[in-house]
Image (cartoon, grey):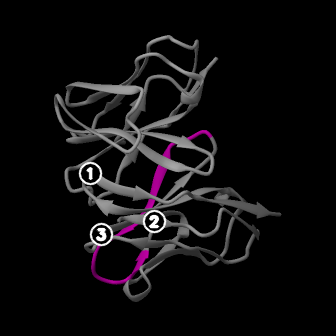
Amino acid sequence: AQSVTQPDIHITVSEGASLELRCNYSYGATPYLFWYVQSPGQGLQLLLKYFSGDTLVQGIKGFEAEFKRSQSSFNLRKPSVHWSDAAEYFCAVGAGNDMRFGAGTRLTVKP
Amino acid sequence: DVKVTQSSRYLVKRTGEKVFLECVQDMDHENMFWYRQDPGLGLRLIYFSYDVKMKEKGDIPEGYSVSREKKERFSLILESASTNQTSMYLCASSSPGGEKGYTFGSGTRLTVV
């Protein structure tokens, strides 16, 4: 069965520190992979996506993600976190009408 | 700027009321979706539509229905609202393949009292 796991419910990092949010998935075929960000009280905004090609993809707001087929992972990274990055982050996997979302990781940024 | 617009940001309704949540997209997308979002549960799909007048049940359709009379508009209906339907409701749209991801509305926070 298709599933997406974000192992970390909540992560706290200091401003300026690096960030890595984990995402593991189970899917029958090669899916599209996405990361979304949700600010409080808002909808989800697409950060980046991957389907094929270079396994390191760049997104908006300075984020990047790396697809590792052998580990069924698609982890999100940022070299230096800004206070405005505090939000909830969702990994999503699938295609067409069949899109599965992780439960989300809430990011807190310490001054 | 492409958009998915949800008509209400906040709604308070009474138990037993019939509730309509409206969603409009301006991207000519075939697919539209309704999700509910609850803390710790992520996004759960209620219904989706892949064409006008076509709909499919998602993971949690009980207590809900939908209507899609025009391509740009997808309505979620709570036939008789209950307190366990208090939640954040998110509408989204996408192209048929979903390769560009979903575009989400800002959400409607519904409270049923």
Q: Quadrant of residue A99?
A: bottom left
Instruction: Identify the residue shown where x is 30% and y is 29%.
Output: B74
Marked residue chain, label 2: A
Q: Which residues are magenta?
A: A41-57
For marks 1 and 2, give the CA distance. 16 Å
Q: Which mark is residue B31?
A: none
Say which mark, if any, is on residue A4.
2
Q: Chain of mark 1?
A: A
Query: How far from the left and from the top, in percent, is residue A33?
Result: 37, 68
Dot 2 crowding, Cα within 10 Å, few <14, some 14–19, many 20+ = many
Which mark is first along the chain, 1 or 3?
3
Reading the image, the residue beneath label 3 is A31
Residue B14's x, y, as percent?
58, 12
At mark 3, the secondary structure is loop
In this view, the residue farthest toward the right is A111
Which structural element holds mark 1? loop
Q: CA distance from mark 2 to mark 3?
A: 12 Å
Tag 1: residue type?
A: Asn
Q: Residue furthest bottom?
A: A70
For image coordinates 27% across by 74% down, the residue present is A30
Residue B103 vertical placement versus B86 (above, below)? below
Q: What distance separates the C-alpha of mark 3 from that of mark 1?
A: 12 Å
For this view, does B45 lie left or right of residue B14? left
Residue placed most toward the observer, B61 or A78? B61
Rate crowding at label 3 as few (under 14), some (14 to 19) or many (20 or more) other CA atoms within 10 Å: many
Magenta-colored stretch includes residue A45: yes
Q: Earlier in the sequence, mark 1 or mark 2?
A: 2
Can residue B75 be seen by looking at this rendering? no
Residue under label 1, please give it.
A97
